[in-house]
Image (cartoon, coloured by chain):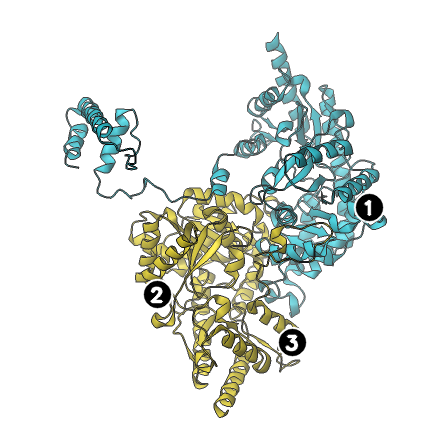
Chain colours: A yellow, B cyan
Amino acid sequence: MAIEIEKPSVGLSKVAVSETHGEDSPYFAGWKAYDENPYNESSNPSGVIQMGLAENQVSFDLLEKYLEEHSEASSWGEGAPGFRENALFQDYHGLKSFRQAMANFMEQIRGGRAKFDPDRIVLTAGATAANELLTFILADPGDALLVPTPYYPGFDRDLRWRTGVKIVPIHCDSSNNFQVTPEAMEAAYRCAESMNLKVRGILITNPSNPLGATIQRSVLEQILDFATNKNIHLVSDEIYSGSTFSSSEFISIAEVLETRGYKDSERVHIVYSLSKDLGLPGFRVGTIYSYNDKVVTTARRMSSFTLISSQTQHLLACMLSNKEFSENYIKTNRERLTWRYDMIINGLKNAGIECLKGNAGLFCWMNLSPLLEEPTRESELALWKVILNEVRLNISPGSSCHCSEPGWFRVCFANMSEQTLEVALGRIHKFMEQRRRN
Amino acid sequence: MRLVVPLQGVVQGRGGLIFGSLIPCALFYFLQLYLKRHRSPNSRSNPPSPSASAQNLAEMNRTSSRSNLLSRGSIVPVLISSLATSISKPNDSPYYIGLDKASEDPYDRIGNPDGVIQLGLSENRLCFDLIEKWMLENLNDSMRGRKGGDLSISGIASYQPLDGTMELKMAMAGFMSRVMGGAASFEPSQMVLTAGATPAIETLCFCLADHGNAFLVPTPYYPGFDRDMKWRTGVELIPVHCRNTDNFVLSISALNQAFNQTRKRGTKIRGILLSNPANPVGNLLSREMLCDLLYFAREKNIHIISDEIFAGSIYGNEEFVSIADVVDSEDFDKSRVHIVYGLSKDLSLPGFRVGMIYSFNENVLAAARKLTRFSSISAPTQRLLVSMLSDARFIKEYIATNKKRIRNMRDLFVAGLEGLGIRCADSSAGLYCWADLSKLILTYGEKGELELWEKLLHVAKINMTPGSACHCIEPGWFRCCFTTLDKEDIPVVMERIRKLADTDAASRG
């Protein structure tokens, strides 16, 4: 909660002084270490390699090529017709052409197995804003959302900070590859009840961050049944849906609804963004797709605090409605991520490290529990510090993702060049060898 | 169940309506009788309240005959939050209703001459030709960036500092300084950039006030504040009324009175929200008044937020003084001063979403920086603007031409109104004028003003913002934005008002 700081002469709010932004946790502390001593192939080869940032840099060339060949996307064409309307356009409905392009793109990612209605798309400046917005809309301050662990550390901030909503974890463990079970959901619900918290929804990330794995259809069905049974909402953050290594392995909640004839779908909302799949986090493009009319209306109105620049909407509408580009991009991006994933998994295996079997995302979930002095969070953080300071790799400790089992780490592989990844794997190999010798 | 199925057959088939209503009625009566006799005081198992009409009961029976009660049209729908429920209600402010009506049937001199003329949107369309020309000459270079390095797509694609790039902050600092006449200078490190001024002001509220706290706001004020500052923050806005006799300039005594009254009822005031230049009146705060406000804020230990978004729209001869200038030049406690700015009005780029918080308080900046993750400016837009704002020659020409054109439009528009006997408040800035239409009101009061607003909107087909939407305490004032018009449209506006006034006068006899 709020921590007492030396009172300034004129007071600030509780939100301003609260620690809920979480920027003092190891997840962010590692970033600071990287910022102070960043690896550079030529100028700083012994610096810290950033493996804690889930960013996709493997397919920039495809974007660059498109922009080279299609200047009308970034310039409104010869004589800039349409510029005026675009510059004035601040309608929170968003550009129709862009919403259409997003709907099509989302359909392509799901191999056409689900349909998306552009009028159900609400635009936000990033998925961070989308998740916060949904929380404001689905829950009152003091209510709770259930979130399976391990989960993205940013949720602690995005879902709770300004909304006053609480997160109650659904504990998952390695005995079944960290999958959600009805028992675990029930336990979390009862836990919330015992704390007098009203549960308003369950939020899943599919594909999962940090696990790097898709949720199986049967589990999705169980989650949807649970939500229906408790009459709560279901938010599915599908931000990594385009980063699955094979198109067929990702099942979106939209597909589950489709097979159920969209019965009782008003409780379901999907969050998406172009930050991961298209590698454009700087563009700030997020969406809420809701099957609930009231949520769509309200989210739209509230999106006035987080609109996407109309210039960017125009650019991306051009890019994403170019079928040739989008199909090629999705396919090539998948192939390159698969290649990277295989590279890192094999590299880690050679060093004697096992990972959770993954099939998506920009990271792998590495098991270092055999290296722990004791199976405790403190041991895990001690190991994390060693890896940060001696091996000079910034990876994310499972405890910052609220993992109930110590010793797991999230390692990102798509935010660097192949050469850098080789260097990182080399360092890990050396580190493991040294430990074996000792 | 078994009773109901044959009932269905009766209702849907022969016997139709009569049996369809008679039998359910009878059943209903007997059901009530039964329940009355058997209801225990602690029983919670009341049926969903039966409606009085038999038709509704027939409906209910028909739905309960289906085996699945939780189908679409669930008896207990999944609920949204209280905040969302209140936001989902239809907008009842004339400000928003008028904007919607005008956009449904927009006036076009050639294509739709009987459409609604939009005077309710403070947008500046007078200088697009200059911006378009700049785009034509510079856009490709600026978007492509120089060869490689930081300015290729990877330079703008990846995560940027969430509170804006240093390049853009520097460019904004330069622009603001020029726009405000060069007296004040701005430090890039004291800026937090946001996706528009709307999130800037909300973020400041989140940093300065807790749920249930309040801000003092001089009236009349921009209707959007009621949404932007209150919705999610839970903050209250306390109006401090300004009057025509003072040309709607704030008085410290009114401020003091509002402060004391609010404190008496147990609400904590966290700050004052000023708009300078004022919206909707368009007047400026003098240096003396700004000093007085700073003294007041110090005495009460509260913040001042100065929304200076119209600073580049000065057309009068009065000098604009930014609160930054006063705070720099005199010995005031800076930690309570925060400025909101943006490019929507002065550079006519509302769609691009460029706003900022400028603060002298390091703690506020630290908190605001973290909050901008929810509303950052898009990277391609940052790059484009760095280019545009750094073009000193273009900016100089733009600012000068903009002022001239706003003044010309204003003079024409105000003269037109004066020709109809309608007076405007004294003003030197903004994209609008504050007109006194009280003579056209039938019954003097808020109700009369709204009736006039409706007539203007639906009969004369002009959308103006009524003073009551801006919390003006004196009825009859309307805000008219003239920068979305062409010169040729002004006579059309005046003619429509004249016609309405004549018709009204005639009907009054």
Residue at mark 1: B326
Whole-angstrom CA distance, mark 3 to mark 2, is 41 Å
SS at mark 2 in the image: helix
Q: Are marks 3 and 1 on the same chain?
A: no
Indicate the quadrant containing the N terminus of chain A: top left, top right, bottom left or bottom right: bottom right
Q: Amino acid at mark 1?
A: Val
- As drawn, A60 above or below B252: below
- Select label 3 or label 2 by which is in front: 3
Residue at mark 3: A37
Residue A374 x/y as whole percent: 46, 79
Whole-angstrom CA distance, mark 3 to mark 1, is 42 Å
Residue A237 x/y as whole percent: 44, 58
Q: How many marks?
A: 3
Quadrant of the rendered structure where residue B296 is? top right
> How packed is label 2: few (under 14 Cα within 10 Å), some, or many (20 or more)?
few
Asked whether, in this view, residue A46 is left or right of residue A174, the answer is right
